[in-house]
Image: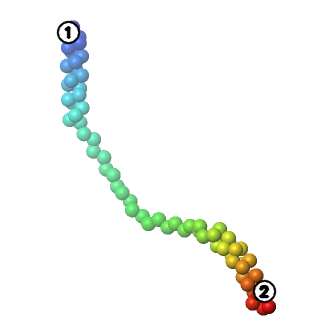
Amino acid sequence: MRTIRYFCLALLLGAMGSGCISAKTKHEIDVRPIHITMDINLKIDRELDNFFGDIDAAGGKEATE
C-alpha cells in the first residue's frame, strides 16, 4: 500500500513539475514573392481554332459564291 502512495505522489509531483517547464522556440517567417506562369489556355485555344477554322473555311466559300 505504501508503494502505491509513493507512486501516486511521484506521479503527482511529476505532473506538477512538467507544467512549470516551458520551451521557447524562435520562428522566423521569410516572405518572398512567388512567380508562377501557367499556360492553361493552350488546349482551349487549339480547340477553338479547330472549331472556328472549320466555320471560317466554310464561311469563306459561301461569301465568294
Q: 24 and 4: which one is in front?
A: 4
Image spot of residue 40 (x, y percent): 59, 67
In the image: residue 48, left or right of residue 36: right
At 23% from the left and 26% from the top, the residue drawn is: 14
Q: How many marks?
A: 2
- Relative to 42, is 31 on the left or the right? left
Disc nearer the start of the sequence (2/1)? 1
Residues 33 and 27: in front is 33
Q: Secondary structure at mark 2?
A: helix
- Which residue lies under the disc numbered 2? 61
Task: Name the residue furthest bottom.
Answer: 64
Residue 47: horizontal and vertical position, in percent?
68, 70
Residue under the point 56% across and 67% down? 38
Amino acid carrying label 2: it is: Lys
Secondary structure of residue under mark 1? helix
Quadrant that contains the N terminus? top left
Give the labeled residue for mark 1.
Answer: 2
Q: Nearer the viewer, residue 42 or 32?
A: 42
Q: Judge whether 3 appears above or below 61 on screen.
A: above
Cα gap from disc 2 to disc 1, whole angstroms: 106 Å
> Split into 4 quadrants, where in the image is the C terminus?
bottom right
Please identify the quarter of the rendering in which residue 41 is found.
bottom right
The spot of residue 46 in percent (x, y) is: 68, 72
| Residue nearer the viewer, 55 or 19 | 55
Name the quadrant containing residue 43: bottom right
* Mark 2 neighbour density, 10 Å: few (under 14) some (14–19) many (20 or more): few
The amino acid type of the residue labelled 1 equals: Arg
